[in-house]
Amino acid sequence: MRHYEIMFLVHPDQSEQVPAMLERYEGIISKYQGLIHRKEDLGRRQLAYPINDVHKAHYILLNIECNLEALEEIKTAFKFNDAILRSLITLQRQAITGESVLMRKEKESRIA
């Protein structure tokens, strides 16, 4: 099995559906005996440029280990979900389990 990092942006009007979406994608991964190494809900953030006249999106980051069948099913689910504005799946050399830079910056800004 290979390691992947998945980042996807959810339409801000659909933010309340994010937990259900995550549960669905986790189900796909576990169905194929995959593992989730990191799951981060980065919340709503400003987009660098508008996508379909939307200026903010709900960011989700996943680091998973799965086979090709699970990855293809996730890609298909992203493709047919209108609430997902953009998604990016990158191949990783190893499992990334530490906190992401975005999450670290967000926590520091809450403390300060």
Image (cartoon, grey):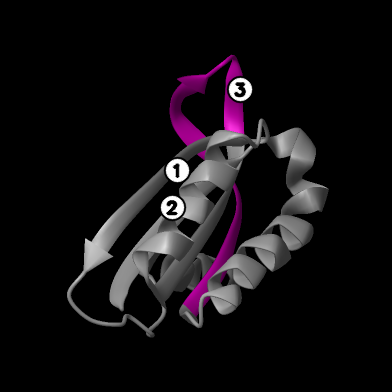
Q: Residue at x 54, y 71 (%)?
A: 29
Q: Earlier in the sequence, mark 3 or mark 1?
A: 3
> In the rendered structure, which amino acid carries the disc numbered 1?
Ser
Q: Residues within 10 Å of mark 2 (few under 14, many from 20)?
A: few
Query: Helix, strand, or loop for circle 3?
Result: strand
Of residues 37 and 51, which is closer to you in this image? 37
Image depth: mark 3 or mark 1 in front: 1
Query: Helix, strand, or loop for circle 2?
Result: helix
Q: In which quarter of the view is residue 45 placed?
A: top right
Q: Residues within 10 Å of mark 3 (few under 14, many from 20)?
A: some
Q: Which residues are magenta?
A: 38-56
Q: Which mark is residue 87?
A: 1
Q: Earlier in the sequence, mark 3 or mark 2?
A: 3
Q: Residues within 10 Å of mark 1 (few under 14, many from 20)?
A: some
Q: Residue at x 51, y 53 (%)?
A: 73
User: Is-magenta flag for residue 47?
Assistant: yes
Residue 84 placed where, x, y %?
60, 38
